[in-house]
Amino acid sequence: MLSFVVSRLLQAAAVMTAVSFLCFVLFNFVGDPVSNMVGQEASPQEREELRRDLGLDDPVPLQFVRFLGNAATGNFGRSYRMARPVGQLIVERLPATLELVFCGALVALALGIPLGVLTALRRDTWDTRMVMTLSLAGVAMPTFVSGILLIYVFSVECKSWVDWLGLTADLCFPSFGRGETVRLGWWTTGLLTGSGIKAIVLPAVTLSLFQMTLVLRLIRSEMLEVLRTDYIKFARARGLTNRAVHFRHALKNTLLPVITVIGLQIGGLIAFSIITETVFQWPGMGQLFIQSVQFADIPVMAAYLVLVSFFFVVINLVVDLTYAVIDPRLRVDRAKAVGNAH
């Protein structure tokens, strides 16, 4: 197990080094950083002095090592657009994105797994056909379209409905913003306020739609395959109840191959929350990245890419280790591979 963990840690370090190199190239060789930081009226002496202060006169390997060291401590320089430390901007936006991803993943799993089991156990029924038809729409519909539809129904049209029913417009969901937040140290959360919870509902549902559909279809296909295996037939022959067969034996084995996919999808939620944050004006890292692209704010772009890659690597590492803990055959195969190599 120790060799398995060490090998995965080395792979993660190699991936992060490669990503950091790409970000270093982006940071240093896409345009002139000095020209982006000073105005047209700056003299050649001022430009040369700034270039020397930034270390741009040093050899490229030395600049890359310095970039790695700064990135490891969270120092990505100053934003060209806002003239503030990039790390400070990331810390301000990170809680909003992580809370959105957490709620989106929670909705996707809370609805995707039960619906996947239901559609597998109730094949060829009208409710299963309806769920599968709606899941096709969830896969085919772009995220920005589903977000706009939710805004139109539950934010715009909702006000006329509640007015017709004699209710207050407070029952409708807000179409943008994060609502009221509470500061807990450096972390700001909207999950402790009523307006914050209402504000996250529509973005979280929008972000979860594709992932929920994917989990539903994956659980259904794995469940159907497991239900046809011999040990399930043997369990039924032993006189076990359907509840025990379905949830104690079939669902447990169904979840094993699904863990890796779910882990990768959670990483995808972080990376692809950009569209959802843009549609709902959610003040997270995705919106910060879009604004940095518009203004060619390279330090913010580089920091975002490194951070998202870090989340991907950590999630994949946790998934690999969890899978190895659940399925010991992976560790055995790894040990055999190492033994054969020697």
Image: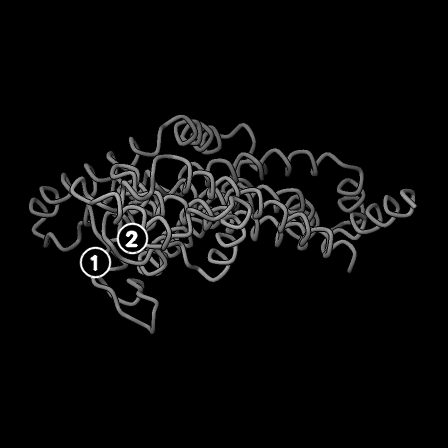
User: Closer to the camera, 214 or 231?
Assistant: 214
Tell me the distance, in whole angstroms, between the alpha carbons under discs 2 and 1.
8 Å
Determine the image quadrant of residue 326. bottom right
The percent position of residue 82, horizontal first and vertical second, equals 23, 52
Residue shown at 76%/53% (left/top)? 4
Residue shown at 54%/52% (left/top)? 65
**Secondary element type, mark 1:** loop
Q: Residues within 10 Å of mark 1 (few under 14, many from 20)?
A: some
Q: How is the image coloured?
A: one colour
| Quadrant of the frame with the N terminus | bottom right
The percent position of residue 275, horizontal first and vertical second, equals 32, 38
Q: Are marks 2 and 1 in contact (CB under 8 Å)?
A: yes
Left or right of 61: which side holds 6? right
Which residue is the site of mark 2?
A: 200
Which residue is the site of mark 1?
A: 179
Q: Where 139 falls versus 255 (above or below)? A: above
Q: Residues within 10 Å of mark 2 (few under 14, many from 20)?
A: many
Q: Tell which residue pokes out farthest to the front in this image.
A: 45
Type of the residue with mark 2:
Ile
* Mark 2 / mark 1, whichever is N-terminal: 1
Left or right of 342: which side holds 194? left
Q: Where 209 falls versus 196 (above or below)? A: above
